Image (spheres, coloured by chain):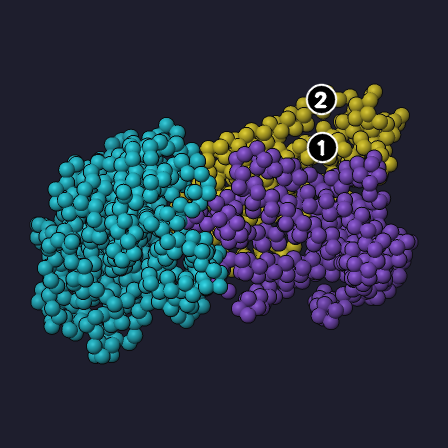
Amino acid sequence: MSLLDIRDLRVTIGDVQALKGVDLTVGRGEVVGLVGESGGGKSMIARSIVGLLPGAARATGEVLFDGADVLTMDAAALAAHRGGGAAICFQNPRGALSPTRSIGRQLTDRLTTHQGVAAAEARTAAVALFESVGIRSAARRFDHYPHELSGGQAQRVMISLATGCAPGLLIADEPTTGLDVTLTREILRRFREAADEEGRGVLLISHDLASIARVCDRLVVLNAGAVVEHGPAADVLAAPADPYTRALLAAVPDVTRPVARTAATPGGEVVRIEDAHVVYGSRFGSGGHHALRGVSLTVRAGETVGVVGESGSGKSTLARLMLGLITPSRGTVTLAGREPSRLRGRELRDLRRRAQLVFQDPIGSLSPRRTVADAVAEPLRAAGVKAPERARRVTAALERMGLDGTYATRRPHELSGGQAQRVGIARALAGEPDLVVFDEPTSALDVTVQAQILKVIGEVTAERGRGSVFISHDLATVRGVCDRVVVLYLGRIVEEGPVEEVFARPRHPYTKALLAAAPTLAGRADGAGVSLTKDPEEAVPGAGCALAPRCPYAEDACRAEEQELRTLGPVRVACRRAHELPDPPDREGPER
Amino acid sequence: MADLTTAADAGPPRAAADRRFATTLIRAGSALLGLVAFAVLVGPLLVRWGPEEIDPAASLAPPGGAHPLGTDVNGMDILSRVLHAGRLDLGVAIASVALAVVLGTALGLLAGYRGGRVDDVLMRVLDVFQAFPAFILALAVAALLGGGAGNLVLVVALVNAPAYARLVRAEVRTVRELPFVEASRTAGASGLGTLWRHVLPNSLTPVRVIAPLNCGWAMLTLAGLSFLGLGVTVPAAEWGAMISLGTGDVVAGRWWTSVPPGLFLLVSVLGFSLLGEGLQERAGVVR
Amino acid sequence: MRIARFAARRLLQAVPVLLGVIVVTFVLVRVLPGDPIRTILGPNATEADAAAARARYGLDQPLWRQFLDYVGGLFSGDLGTSIQSGASVASEMAVRVGPTMELVVLAVVIATLLATVLGIWSARRAGRAGDHTLRVLALVGNSLPEFWLGLVLILLAYSVLGWVPAPSGRVDPDTDLTLITGADLLDAALTGNGPAFASAAGHLVLPVLTMVVVIVAPLLRSVRASALEVLGSEAYQAAAAHGLSERTLLRGYLTRAALVRLPALAALVFGFAIGSTVLVEYVFSWQGFGQWALRGLLYRDYPVVQASVVVIALCYTLIFLIADVVHAVLDPRVRI
C-alpha cells in the first residue's frame, strides 16, 4: 500500500472546478514531482492532503493516507494527521515563518506537539535538527527571528519545521522559487536525502520542470485540474506522451543545448561604461553598499549582451547605470555619445529616452490607474509627439506585440503577466530607442508564457540599429537570446566573452559553478562539476579575489591580490588560475 | 476621532461576505446622512418658530403643544433650533475637512516627493504640532482665533491638516519607489509630469477612505468646542452649544433640552463612521 | 539592555520636538487676544494699577526676556504664578494631575484590554453575526459625543435610577481620605481606606465608562484587522497545517503578532483621551487638570495655559516613546 493514495479527487470552489478527478500516489522513500503551471491546481492538491481546503471548497473522492481518508477525518484525527502524517514546506519560507516567534521556538512547538519531546530537551533536539539541515551555528540561530535569515537559511528552517513534525510524507510547495541556482541544488538534495535516508515519501510541487526533474523518481503533470501524464521521471522526460507535457518541455530553455544564432555584425557604440563604481550611501555617511566595483562594458548597435549573476551581484544596478537613472560614484557612462551625469533637466530626459528598460515585474511597472495606451504613449508624450501621431504609433507598437486594439483601453489588472510584459516591451520600443535593457523580463512568468516572451524578445533583439542588454539569473535564457555574455560576481565582471564560448568552455570557477548548478532536463550525476563551498551570505570576501572564500580552487595568492580581467583565448577572465583549471566533465547522460 | 493611522490596518483581501458587509455599511451610512441632510434642509421650512425666536410664554416648556420638542431656558423652540443647527454643523464639518485635505495633500506631496531638506523641515514642524493631542490643539487655536463658524472651519482644518500631510507623504514615499514610477522616469517624463500623472492618483486612496471618517470627528470637535463656549455661542443654534445650555437641566431630570441635539449629532457622526468603515473595508478588499 | 539604549535614543530624538513645543506654546499664548490683567483688575482699575500689575507678573519686560525667564523657570521647576489665583502654578497643577491621570489611564487600559480580547474574538468569527454586531456597536460608541454621553448616563444612572453618587466631586469628603498622589482610588488603596475606595470607585464608574465607550472602537478595529491579517497569513496557515494545537496557535502565533501595531494606536488614543477629559471633567465637575487648563485658557491666565499645554505635550510625547519601546519589544523586526 502506498503511503499516500489519492483517488478521483474533485474539488469545486463556487462554480469553478479546481480539480477534476486527480489520481496520485506517493510511496515511502519515493520522490514524486508534481508539475504544472500556476492556477493548475497544484496547491489545491497539497491543501487537500493536509485537510486545509478553503472554506468555500467542496471535495469528493478519496485522499487515503496510510489507509485513512483525510477528507472524512474528525478534528482529532486531522490534528494528528497534520504535521505528524503529512507536513508541508511552504513556498516563500520567509512569509511562512511567523515573524514574531523565534525560529527555535517555532521548531520546539512542532517537536513537543508531534514527537512528544519534553520541553526541557526540546532545545537540544531543535539545535540538532537545525544542524542536520545545514544551518551553521545552530545554537546561536535558535533565538533568531525569521527576518534575520537569508532566503536559503529560511528555506532550511522551513524544512526543519516540516521534518520536525516527523511526518511520513513531506510536501514541498515550490521549494526553490526565488533561490539562486547554487542553493536550489543544495535544497533539492535535502529532499532526496529525506526519502533515501529517512524513508519518507516526498511530494515536490513546482511550476519549473527543469529544476526538480533530476531528483524525482516519478513525475505527475497537472494541467487545468487534471493529471495529463504520469510515469517514471526518465520516461516522461525522454518520451512525453501528452501535448501539454511536450509544450512544457519545449518551453524549458536548456542550458546544455547550443543555440544557432546568426552572428551579429555590431555597429557603432550605443553605450560605453568605463571603470564604473556605484556605492549606495547609507544615510549616515560612512559605510554604504558597494554595488559595482570597477565595471567596464560596451554595447554596440545590433548586438545583444547578456548579464548573468546571482542576486546581489549588481545586475540591476548595472542596468540603471546604463539608463542614466543613477550616477556612478566613479568612472563614466556614455550613452549615445553623451554622458548623462553631465546633463540636467530637459537634456537629460531627452537622453534618457534613448535607452529604455523592460521590467522584471510586468504588472507592477504599469501605473494601476492608467490605460495600456496611456502607458505605451508615455515616452512619445515625453518626446513631444502630437496626439494623432502618438495614437497611430501606440497602435502600431501594440500590434507588433500581437495585442489588438481592444487592449488599448485596458488597465493593468485586466492583463495577464504575459500580456503586461508585451505592453512593457511595446512601451520600451515605442520611442525607438538606441538601447533596450531587459531586466529579468521572464522571471515572473509561467514557463510556457516565458517561452513566448523570449521568442518576442529574440525578434526584437535581432533588429539592427539597436543594442540590447539581457539581464538574468537564468543561464539558459541568456544562451538563447544573447551574442555576448558578461558574468557578474559581487559587483565585478569575472568572465566575459561570446556566448557559445563561455557556455561550452567556462573558464572562471564561478561560471563553472553556475553552469554546473543550472537545471537541466537531461540530468547528470549529482556532485559532478564545480560546486561552491559556502552559501553566498556566509562568505565574507576579503582583500583578494572576491570569490576566494567560496572557491574550491582558491590558493593563498588568490586571497592576497585582486583579480583583473585578462584575455584568455576568445574570452576575458578575472582568475589567475583560469588557464590551469580542468574542463568540466561531460554534462550529458542520465543521473539515476 | 482623528485616528488617521488606521488606513493601513484595513488588512488583506477578504471574502465576498466582507464585501457585502462593507456595502451594507456604506449604504447604512449614506442613508443616515441622507436622512439628516433632508431633515436639516427641508425641516426648517416646516416649523413655526425661528431658531432664535423667543416664546416669552414658555421657558423650559416640556415637549407637546406649540413646541413639539419643548423649549430651552430662554424660551426658544428646541425643534427649530436642532434643525437649523444641522446646517451649520454639517456645513462646517465638510468644509473644514475639504480644506484640511487640500492643505495636507499639498504639503504631503511636497515633502514626500522632494524628500531631503524640505521633507526634514516640514516633518519637524508637523512633529511639533502633532505633539499636542488634536482636541487640545483645537482648543488653543480656537481660543486664539475666536469663535464663529468661519473660524471654526479654519481651526478644524489646521488641526487636521498635519495628519493628512503625513498620510499622503507616507503613501507618496511608497508609490515613488514602485516600478511604474521608474518606468515613467525611464520614458523621459518630467518630474512634475510623473508626480501629476502617476504618483498623485495612486497616493490618494487612504485619503479618500479617511476623509468621511474625519468628517465625523470634525463634527464632534466643533460641537465640543461650542459645548465649552469656545465655538459658536448661544443664541446661535449649534448642537454642542445647545447641549451645553441644557447641562444643568439633566441633573434636574429635564431631558428634552439636551437629548435631541445630542441624538442628531450622534446620528450624523454615525453616518460618517459607517460610511468610512465601509470604505476602509472595501479598500482592504480591493487592494 | 538594547531596549534601554533604544529608549534613551528615542528620548534624545524627542528633545527638539519638546523645544519646539515650548516655543510654540509661548508664542501662541502671547498672541491670544485679550488682556489677562484687565480681566483680573476689573473695569474700574486705572492705567497705573494695570502697569503695576503688569510689572508684578513680568509682563512689562520685552518678549525675549519673558521667554528666557519662562524657559529658565521650566528647568528649575518654577512654572510661574497664576494671574487669576495668585498661587504657584506648580502647586496648583500638582493637585490636578492625579485625578485626571487616574481617569485617562484607567479608561485607556480598560479599553485596550477590552479591544484585545474582543478584537481577537471578533476576527476569529469574521463575517458572522457576532462580529458584525460588535463592530457596529463599537462604531456607535465612537460616534457618541462624550460630553453628551456623560449627560445621558447621569440622567439614567443618577437622576432616574439613583445607582451612582451625584456627579460632583470625586470622593465623599466624609471618608477623610489622605491625599498622596491626588489619584483618589490609588490614595485610598495606599492608605487602606476602604470606604474612600468604594466612594472613589463609585464616582469613577460613569466618567471612565463614558471614555471607554468613546475610545474603544479604533483600538478594536485595529486589533481585529491585525488578527485577521495574521489568521490569513501564510505564516499562521503554515503553523496550522503543521497541526499545532489551538492553544499554541493562539498564544504563540496569533496574539503577539496581532498586537504589534496596537501600541502606536494606543498612544494616539491616549492623546485623544487627554483631550476628552476637558469635556468629561466639565460634565462630571471632576476638578481635574482639564478643567483647570480650560479655565486658564478662558481667562487668558498665561502661566497656567503655558504650563498646562507644555505638560500635556510632554506627557503625550512620553506616551509615544513608551509605545515605541513596547512596539520594539513586541515586534522583533523593529531595529533597535
> In the displayed structure, would residue C227 be above or below residue C10?
above
Q: Residues within 10 Å of mark 1 (few under 14, many from 20)?
A: some
Q: What residue is shown at x 79% (from left), y 23% (from top)?
A: B68
Chain painted in yellow in the figure: B
Determine if residue B93 is in view.
no
Quadrant of res B148: top right
> In the displayed structure, would residue A296 be above or below residue A178?
below
Question: Position of B36 compared to A590: left or right?
Answer: right
- In the picture, the quarter occupied by the N terminus of chain C is bottom right
Chain painted in cyan in the figure: A
Q: Position of residue B39 (x, y in %)?
A: 67, 25
Circle 1 chain: B
Q: Position of residue A542 (x, y in %)?
A: 30, 74
Q: Amino acid at mark 1?
A: Leu
Quadrant of res C62: bottom right
Label 1 sits on a secondary structure element that is helix
Q: What residue is shown at x 11% (from left), y 54% (from top)?
A: A589
Check disc 1 and report the residue beneath it.
B263
Circle 2 chain: B
Question: Position of A124 compared to C177: left or right?
Answer: left
Image colour for chain C is purple
Q: Residues within 10 Å of mark 2 (few under 14, many from 20)?
A: some
Check disc 2 and report the residue beneath it.
B45
Q: Position of residue A412 (x, y in %)?
A: 35, 39
Q: What residue is shown at x 63% (from left), y 63% (from top)?
A: C18
Determine if residue C242 is in view.
yes
Q: What residue is shown at x 14% (from left), y 44% (from top)?
A: A235
